[in-house]
Image (cartoon, rainbow, N blue to C red):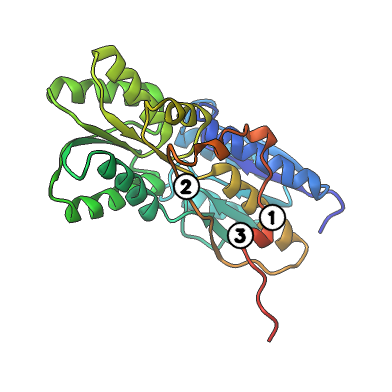
Amino acid sequence: MAPSPRLAVFTKNRVNPAYAAARLAADRVAAEAGARTVHFVPETPDDLAQQRALVGEALAIAPDGVVFVPVDDRQMGPDVARFTAAGIPVVVCINRMDGPFVSVVGSDDIAVGRTAAGALFSALGGNGRIVALEGPAGAPTGRDRSIGLGQLLEETPEIVLLGRAGGAFQQPPAREAMARLLAEHPAIDGVWAANDLMALGALDALAAAGRTARVVGVNGLPEAIEHIARGTMVASVDFSAFNIAGIATHALLRHLRGESVPPSITVPAALIDSGNYRQWQVPFALRPVPSWDEIVPPRPAV
């Protein structure tokens, strides 16, 4: 590994606190190893063309390695392949994608979506009318979480899905989408949101309409945790971009040192609810990044 390796870190936007946490974790892990990070973030959130242009900018500085969160797992494939063609190792994280990467680090998003749905269905007593706020089509996290919701809906016929709407994983679009769903449906008992920003958008729309519903999200963002503490949100799932990006950075640094790295790493995602939310009230700046061995236990000696 170079004396002071330079790592290019790609995230999707600066509006989602989860990606700010991801950048913080990458910075911290890199600094502890004597490495430097350079961040590449589209000015327009989740902008595909801008992320493609940023790939070119990163290639121009010839980083020693790349931690990459794709805006779109399908359309960004040829662009990310430019790094590997140049001999630059890539670890993909958060949004999984196919390619010749050192490793792909994420959580089980089908299970994440199912866990959030389970918390909502339980809060409704197994009976009620719900709506779903879904992520963008280009995000495998959103697609898989919706699959998890669908699985549990099939097993719980007393829960009726009234409608779905795209919220782009962002708060303002989700607020607008939820306002439309409220106008269409005079009675909504619950809201399943594929991330916390969309859950917060749903809460905004409910408040503006003078209505209430049980709401769940994903990410364990600080504002969502405060809503859980106040009882205005049922639960979130700790799909932790902070933990995932930290482990992805560990993986890249291990590879640069010539150490082994598994091709796929799954970071656990726990349910956060009224019974355990206090442990997530610690700000990201004060949270420890998981160690490599916490997530990837060493293989036993043969």
Q: Sequence order check: which comes first, mark 1 or mark 2?
A: 2
Secondary structure category for the residue under label 3: helix
Question: Closer to the observer: label 1 or label 2?
Answer: 1
| Residue 302 in which image quadrant | bottom right
Q: What residue sits 50% from the left and 60% below the top?
A: 99
Q: Amino acid at mark 3?
A: Ile
Tag of residue 76: 2
Q: Sequence order check: which comes first, mark 2 or mark 3?
A: 2
The reply to whether discs 3 and 1 touch (Cβ–Cβ < 8 Å) is yes
Secondary structure category for the residue under label 1: loop
Q: Amino acid at mark 1?
A: Ser
Give 190 or 108, whichever is nearer the viewer. 190
Instruction: Work out how far the residue at label 1 is from the one at label 2, CA to CA, in angstroms.
Output: 30 Å
Give 298 or 281, whichever is nearer the viewer. 281
- How many numbered discs sit on the rendered protein? 3
The residue identified by callout 3 is: 295
Tag of residue 154: none
Q: Residues within 10 Å of mark 1 (few under 14, many from 20)?
A: some
**Residue 152: horizontal and vertical position, in percent?**
24, 53
**Residue 257: horizontal and vertical position, in percent?**
78, 63
Q: What residue sits 52% from the left and 40% below the top?
A: 52
As displayed, is residue 22 above or below residue 171? below
The residue identified by callout 1 is: 291
Q: Residues within 10 Å of mark 2 (few under 14, many from 20)?
A: some
Q: Is residue 295 left or right of residue 275?
A: right
Q: What residue sits 47% from the left and 41% below the top?
A: 71
Q: Residues within 10 Å of mark 3 (few under 14, many from 20)?
A: some
